[in-house]
Image (tube, rainbow, N blue to C red):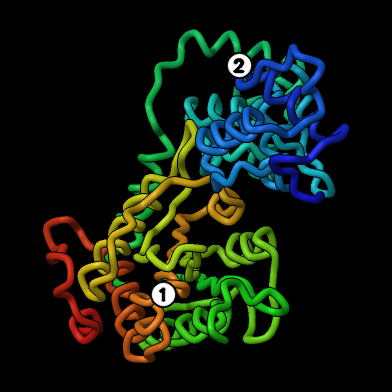
Amino acid sequence: MQDLRRGATGSAVAEVRRMLASLGLLDNTNPEFGDVFDEITELAVRHFQQRRGISVDGAVGAETYAALTGAHWRLGDRVLSHDAAQLMIGDDVSALQQQLLELGYNLVRADGVFGATTAEGTRAFQRDYGLVPDGICGPATLHALRQLGRRVVGGRPQLLREMVAVAASGPSLLGKRIVLDPGHGGDDRGIVHDGIEEAALVWDLATRLEGRLTALGVRSWLTRGPSNAATDEQRATLANEVGADLVLSLHVDGFASPRANGVAAYYYGGGETSSTIGERLADLVQRELVARTGLLNGRIHGKSWALLRLTRMPTVRVELGYLTSPIDRPRLVDPLFRDTVAEGLLVAVQRLYLPLADDPPTGVMRIPAIAG
């Protein structure tokens, strides 16, 4: 769909305003402004994006529109089932997943998408409760969940599972499975400034990191080649199919003002659920890169972007500086700088698997120490 932003008019704007009003974010009672994307509508969109962990730009693109649509569903409004050709998405799915997680069923996380894992979790619950295990959340399953809900005490079993999985995999990187995601690609070159392309820079960085991982016995996959591209959904599918232990998504940023600079890392979060191990990895990545490169610390942030949400393993997206910045750009184009970044990323991954007692201070571990 074409992005809707301030100044737009028409039936699509009217629909967006109705959805915002139903969520309590907009007073839509004045018919005079019912199909006008005005300043108040933009503020409401920004509020919604901030609350949902979506990039806050005040415009309604495909991602924001899908999130608005899904936000209207409440558990019980419709029968939930798995259809691989057209996945059901919405807050009702998130509510179901959250209840199943609280009951101890392993769904990885409540991502709001009724996929095969959610269907299997629903079947497991139905079997345990004596229902027909069809994987469909209809009236009978919903009734059973509501009866149990009054006895369920909170907690974060998915957090415990993530921590146990990391600890059980051991401190060595040998045999780990890591997906490297150089952003953009193909006709989409990402940020382009003074003839320098984001897609080319992150591809080069990904191959440098891939070589280091291979030397340490890590199995690694790239989500694209040097001249092709993939959607975020396709990249997430690859990571899930190969059973990756984690995903590193590599990007550089850009902004209208040349004063914007620095590095930032993103993990799945920002809503009612988040990836705790993803947050831990994002923090390690951020601290290592800031210490080793001197880039401004843009900190870590929870987001619900598609790649972060749809991957079943901890995924971190790193924005490695601003091509539009006179401070960051000379560093980004320097191959030695990209070597330093690759080493920092590798060290962050290793530190994720080390017991806390053996975790060294930030910025001191070196690749030969890991190899030894």
Task: Tell me the SS state at disc 1.
Answer: loop
What is the C-alpha distance between the residues marked 2 and 1?
A: 40 Å
Image coords of residue 314 (percent x, y)? 45, 55
Q: Is residue 127 visible?
A: no
Image coords of residue 319 (percent x, y)? 44, 65
Q: In which image quadrant can residue 366 be found?
A: bottom left
**Compared to 360, does 9 lie above or below?**
above
Image coords of residue 237 (percent x, y)? 66, 61
Dot 1 alpha-carbon crowd within 10 angstroms: few under 14, some 14 to 19, many 20 or more: few
- Give me the residue at 51% from left, 70% from top: 179
Identify the mark nearer the N-term, 2 or 1: 2
Question: Which amino acid is tagged 1?
Answer: Gly
Foreground: 341 or 357? Answer: 341
**Compared to 87, does 248 lie above or below?**
below
Q: In which quarter of the image is the C terminus?
A: bottom left
The reply, left or right, for residue 61 in relation to residue 369 is right
Foreground: 265 or 189? Answer: 189
Dot 2 alpha-carbon crowd within 10 angstroms: few under 14, some 14 to 19, many 20 or more: many
Residue assigned mark 2: 145
Image coords of residue 178 (percent x, y)? 47, 70
Question: Which amino acid is tagged 2?
Answer: Leu
Residue assigned mark 1: 175
**Compared to 277, does 230 lie above or below?**
below
Give the numbered dot on residue 318. Answer: none
The reply, left or right, for residue 302 in relation to residue 226 is left
- Give me the residue at 56% from left, 81% from top: 197
Task: Tell me the SS state at disc 2.
Answer: helix
Total number of numbered discs in the rendering? 2
- Give me the residue at 50% from left, 79% from top: 202
- Extreme right residue here? 11
**Compared to 115, does 332 lie above or below?**
below
- Give me the residue at 62% from left, 26% from top: 96
